[in-house]
Image (cartoon, grey):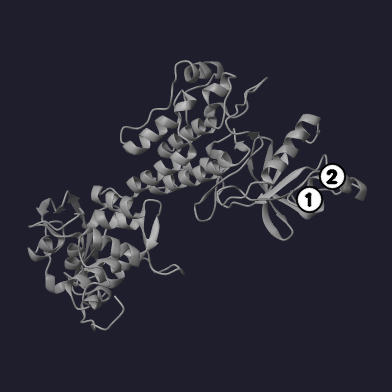
Amino acid sequence: MDPQYSRDQFNNFQDFNSERSGPPEIRPEEITFEELIGTGSFGKVYKGRCRQKAVAVKLLHKQNYDAATLTAFRKEVHLMSKIYHPNICLFMGACTIPGKCVIVTELVPKGNLETLLHDQKMQLPLYLRMRMARDAALGINWLHESNPVFVHRDIKSSNLLVDENMRVKICDFGLSALKQKHKMLKDQSSAKGTPLYMAPEVMMFKEFNESSDVYSFGIVLWEILTRKEPFSHHRELEKFREAVCVKHERPIIPADCLESLRKLIEKCWDKDPQHRPSFKDIISSLDHIIIDAAISDLRGREFWKKNFITEQEVPSEAFIDALCNWAKAPTRNQCDKASLEYLNIKCLKAVLADSSKNEGSIVNIEKFGKILEFFGPMNETTAPGTTSIMDTIREVLSHKWFHGDLDTTEAASRLNGQPIGSFLIRFSSTNAGCFTISQVVGDNNSIKHQRVSRQGPKFIYQNILYNSLIEIVSKSAGGNNGDLPLNSNLGVPNYKFLALFCNVSSSSDTY
């Protein structure tokens, strides 16, 4: 920006920084503009730099500062300076000199949620999308629980920013309003917000409160679910207003939607504002929905909800003890280190726990859901004639040919130079709950990868039904698709898992 202003003019606008808690004033020459990254209610948003830090810089669409525009700008600055929450975009300062007004916030690197959702090349599993929805709900709940209450008034997917860890932050407070608890708001001349996400009572110039944000969130939830634009068939505003406000039209929820998610969406966009849930209730519902999205096994869902309802990652020790209690099996500290029960715990941790994080070994809900798809179904207790999931995992890992989580390239590397007929079995990297048999089938070290699919608790390999992976190998299955019948002697050993079955000293504290 061209800093053509006097020191006196700059000082005249220090009133925004007069309170110690107010926003820090930023001088125009401290800001460098780079590329355009978005457009908000009142201005364009640029990537930039300020005081040696990469930031987002919001510049008003117009710089002919009439009183109303300048008042709205200063209002947003004032609002943002008082909001601090991990799921709300961090306000860093502002320049309030007329003609040079900008707001500086943290730079959220992955852009807005709308762009990510509508990019079909972007892998966004339902579990991740529901976690993003919960992030947004946490931010809005913070606004609604404040005193006075912050009503955002422009909740939409393009106002939800996504950081490098796929966490969501709310932005753009240009239309926000303050209200006392239990009081109502009302637009006088024009309805403020984005029509596609606007609550019916707002469009009809009726009194409204924070439940209007709940309606908007319901539309966003539908968009997060379907990854489609809401009301895309509407082109005329008046017909759209009649459809939503009079005929109560809402987007069609897909038939395969989780029932828990369907109920929440329908509650959020209820025509009666008093019937819509609070964001406290929405967050509670999303805790259950996240579990439903991550874990398809019904017993597995029940287990996680009973023990870790608000958590998506838990310490592996706490998880294993909870699972042992669920299965009515001895916990880590209750069983002998040389016992079969302790070996079960070691094998479970080997396939489930993630030790890549600094805080130690953890279990992720999504990984747990996938393990249940591979080794489930999960039983609460071991009834006569049934096998617990921990027993199943141990039995599979005890065979040298099982390699677990391995991609195609790594499988080929481990089979390189092995005799014809050599094979290994691994998790499928593309199909949930399925396995892949990788086998050397030719003299030139050519390798064939074939899927083992699931049908309930059964396994299907080359159109034949088996009771287990172990049975597939023991019955020398295969040989019908340009491969060779499986020979257990030619299984390529996985020493990582085999090491679990070495004798462990009873005094050892590791597992």
Residue type at the position of mark 2: Phe
Looking at marks 1 and 2 on the same chain, the residue that comes earlier in the sequence is marked by: 2
| 302 w.r.t. 243: above or below | below
Question: Which x, y percent locates residue 501?
Answer: 20, 77
- Mark on residue 13? 2
* Label 1 Cα crowd, 10 Å radius (few <14 / some 14-19 / many 20+): many
Give the residue drawn at x 54%, y 18%. 236
| 289 w.r.t. 272: above or below | below
Q: Are marks 1 and 2 in contact (CB under 8 Å)?
A: yes
Asked whether the viewer can see residue 411, the reply is: yes
Residue type at the position of mark 1: Glu
Q: How many marks?
A: 2
Residue hosting label 1: 25
The answer to whether 414 appears left or right of 249 in the picture is left
Q: Secondary structure at mark 1?
A: loop
Q: Quadrant of residue 282?
A: top left
Q: Quadrant of residue 400?
A: bottom left
The answer to whether 306 appears left or right of 59 in the picture is left
Q: Quadrant of residue 251?
A: top left
Question: Which x, y percent locates residue 492?
Answer: 21, 73
Question: Which x, y percent locates residue 193?
Answer: 60, 29
Question: Which x, y percent locates residue 161?
Answer: 56, 46
Quadrant (top left/top right/bottom left/bottom right) for the C terminus: bottom left
Q: Nearer the viewer, residue 443 or 494?
A: 494
